[in-house]
Image: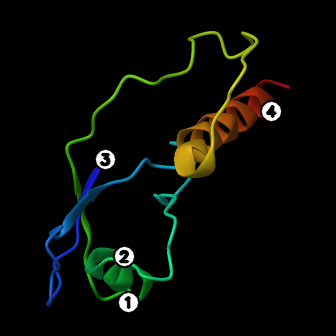
Amino acid sequence: MEWTLPHTKTDSRGNRRYFSISSSPTENEITMTVKFYDKASSYKTELLSLQSTKQIVGAQVSGDFTLPKDLKTPLVLIAGGVGIAPFRSMIQYIIDKIYKLI
């Protein structure tokens, strides 16, 4: 998903970034997974200090990285670093859906 975070002193990379959603559709909040480095961009510096009164805009949902329709289908998920974000979402979804069936 593309996230726009308006802020002053925007560096050359601008005020938009793409981050995967790490929360499940079964959860009440939207979360994303982000790695922060010591020398963060102006965007990540602003994101790290984000207050509840400030808005970040999500747009351009894209991708087709989805679970099979049968949630009991065996899966192997391999990721590194923040690439784990969509897996976290999928695993939480499976847990929430399957435990409701039991």
Circle 1 packing at 10 Å, graded few (<14), some (14-19), many (20+), is few
Q: Against 35, is 94 above or below?
A: above
Tell whether label 2 touches label 1 (CB within 8 Å): no
Which residue is at a point 13% across and 72% down the rendered structure image?
12
Q: Which mark is residue 44?
A: 2
Q: Nearer the observer, disc 4 or disc 1?
A: 1
Which of the two residues, 59 or 97, is positioned nearer the viewer here?
59
Tell whether label 4 touches label 2 (CB within 8 Å): no
Which residue is at a point 41% across and 89% down the rendered structure image?
49
Q: Nearer the observer, disc 2 or disc 4?
A: 2
Q: Which residue is mark 1?
A: 51
Relative image position of residue 81 (x, y in whole percent): 61, 50
Q: Amino acid at mark 3?
A: Met
Q: Amino acid at mark 1?
A: Gln
Q: Nearer the observer, disc 4 or disc 3?
A: 3
Q: CA distance from mark 4 to mark 1?
A: 35 Å
**25 relative position to 79: left or right:** left
Q: Which residue is mark 3?
A: 1
Viewport quadrant of the C terminus: top right
Q: Which residue is mark 4?
A: 99
Nearer the N terminus, badge 4 or badge 1? Answer: 1
Give the structural element (helix, strand or loop) at label 3. Answer: loop
Which of the two residues, 98 or 56, is positioned nearer the viewer here?
56
